[in-house]
Each structure stands twice: as structure tokens, then as C-alpha cells.
Image (cartoon, rainbow, N blue to C red):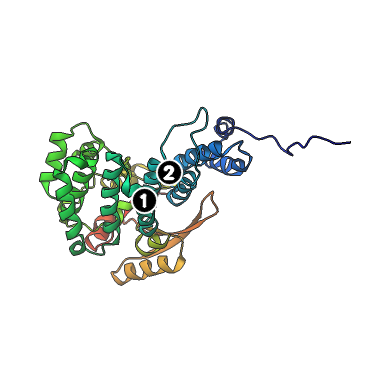
Amino acid sequence: MFFAASPLFALSSAQDIKAQAMQKKSVDESISYIHSSIKNAASDADKRSLYYFVATLEELTGLYEEASSSYAKAAGIAASDAKGMPKVTTEQIVIDAVRCSLNCGDYSTAESYLNSSVRSSKNPEILAHVNLYSVWSDLCRAKNVAETSGSVATLKVYAESESMKSVRPAVLLTLWYITGQGQYSDSLKKSYPNSPEAGIVKGNVKVLSVPFWYFVPRAVPEAQVAETASTPKTTTSSSSSSTEKKSSSSSSSSTEKKTTSSSTTKESQSSSAKKVREQLGLFRNKDNADTLIKDLKAKGFTAYSYTETRASGTTYYIVVVDENKDGTMGKKLRAAGFDCYPVEY
């Protein structure tokens, strides 16, 4: 007697797995559910769409390393889009993976993705992002303002290039951020008045910086360090080997909920029982956290670290300095060459 072979478990569509994931109590639970369910996806198309979808959730919650990996896995599956799931090209997924790699400080991985077939893309917008992210990768490597000169020169050319029109607001924002020169902020406000980038330079938009912006040296005088102008997490956001090397902060969802504007630190302290501390770095490697603490102590700051374990299981060492009574610790740290932002706890 013969029996027809049947699977031990029912295969599910990406649409069904997504629907189940969205019923979970938290984003972290949704992410974990999708990762555990991908093996039961009915087809390669379903797996590709699920990896892409979970990557978007990971990116939104500040899990940039995980998001980069998920985007890369999606891009590596040769299949079409699953029924009922977002439609996206493989080239765009690669660009998303590059952005997330830069966001977490991993410029080496970002560069490996950039050196894939996207460099020969026929899509002008993809090529514009390749060019922009290549410069951003170089900026992540820069250890001081002098080492940004080549990137600044390239960005000035891009600011005038018709082929870079789709990312010009991000180009102008980057030039303004690095140089502090008003011509770039003026150009943003004049040519792209309704863009997020223009809102940022005007101080009307408060968006928590992704880590990328903390890696970039700035030639901005202390008086011009725009405490009201956080830098963006847009579609042209941007750096764990290099995170350990140069990471200065993180924007995980838990941190985002606690972050406040530097300009309101005094107000936060006086109107709330919560304490405030300046966060300077987030590392997976304890030795690198200890190195930053040593540098801070050498400049006279009482720095220390604490650990935070994410839903992914990764433990991070977070370097902080407690806020002082008059709420000026952030200014003192930046004046000493350390980027930071305040968090309540």
C-alpha cells in the first residue's frame, strides 16, 4: 500500500505570515515571529517579500545591522514579489541594505554592496544613491575635518549635477552639516522649502539623528552647532566592525522614546523627576566602549557604560556621562570634541 507524501506542516504565504505578525503585542515580537516563520514560507517569492518586510520593521526600530542583513537576504533571492506584498526591485533592496549598513557604522559592508551590480544600474535614481552613499562611506572613514575635504569637493560637484537631482536635498544637507556654511542651508530653504532637509536646517523638524551623522567630522563653530537641528532619518539616511571603531550613538526604538532635544535639557530636569545623561556611544565590543570611556576621562569627564540587550539577543555597551546641575554637560562634551545627545532614565 502506498501513501501520498504530505508535508509535516502547512506552508504559509507571505501575506498570511505578515498578518499574523501584525497581531503581536510589540514590534520586537513581530520581527521575531517573521524570522521564525520564514522557513515555512510557501515559495521563494514569499521568503523574499518577508525578508524585505521584516527589514523595514528593523530599520524603523533602529536595528540597522539586522535590517541590513535582512535586506541583503531579500536581494539574494531570485524571485518576484509575493502576492499582496510591497513591490520593490532588487536594486532598491540593495540600496536599502547599503543605507542600513552606513547607519550602523559598517562602511565596509556598505561598500561591498555598492560594488555589486547596482553600480551598472540603468536607473538614474539608483545611480544617484550609489554616488551619494559612496561619499557617505568615505565620510564615515574620516577621522577629522581635514579628511573630509575630498568628499566635500565631490559633494559640491554633485550639488550642481543634473544626474544627482533626485538626492540633491541630501547632498545640500550633508554639505551644510559638515561645513556649517549658510549657502547650503539657504539653497535648501529656497529650492526645497517643503523637504524634510529644509525643515531640519530651519529647526522646524525634530528628527532623531541616526548614528551615521555622529560619525561625520564637522567644521562648525560651537556657536553654530544647531541644537535645534537634529539630522535626518530619511530615505537618504546613512556606517559591526566600524561601529566598534567610530560609533558615537544609536537610535534604537527604546532610545528614541527617551531622547530629548539638547536645548530642553534644563527644562526636562526642572519639570520632571527623571534624570538625564548624555549618551556618547553604543558598542557591541566592550573594549571599544572602554576606550571611549578612557578618552573621556582623560578630558576630565566622569564617563561610564551600561549594557542593553536587544530582542535580537545582541548586547550593547552604552557609554554615557551624567548631566550636570545647570544642564550644560552636552555643550561641554561637544566643545571637547565628543558628539552626544541627552536621554532620560
Which sits in the foreground, 338 or 80?
80
**Residue at (58, 34) in percent of width and height:** 17
> What percent of the width, then of the height, locates residue 190?
12, 34
Q: Which label belongs to residue 336?
A: none
In percent of width and height, residue 14 lies at: 56, 33
- Looking at the rendered image, the quarter that the N terminus falls into is top right
Q: Quadrant of residue 221?
A: bottom left
Q: Is residue 327 left or right of residue 225?
A: right
Q: CA distance from mark 1 to mark 2?
A: 9 Å
Tell me the tag on residue 103. 1
Does residue 148 appear in this view? yes
Above or below, 228 against 81 in this view is below
Query: Could you tell me if the residues under marks 1 and 2 are in contact, i.e. CB atoms within 8 Å?
Result: yes
Amino acid type of the residue tagged 1 in the rendering: Asn
Would you call the spot at circle 1 few (<14 residues within 10 Å), some (14-19), or many (20 or more)?
A: many
> Which of the numbered marks, if any, corresponds to residue 59?
2
Question: Height in image: 69 above or below 290?
Answer: above
- In this view, 169 is above or below 320: above
Disc 1 on helix, strand or loop? helix
User: Element under label 2?
Assistant: helix
Q: Is residue 192 left or right of residue 80?
A: left
Q: Quadrant of residue 184?
A: top left
Report the front residue among 239 and 95. 95
Instruction: State the residue at coordinates (37%, 64%).
Output: 245
Label 2 crowd bin: few (<14), some (14–19), many (20+), radius 10 Å: many
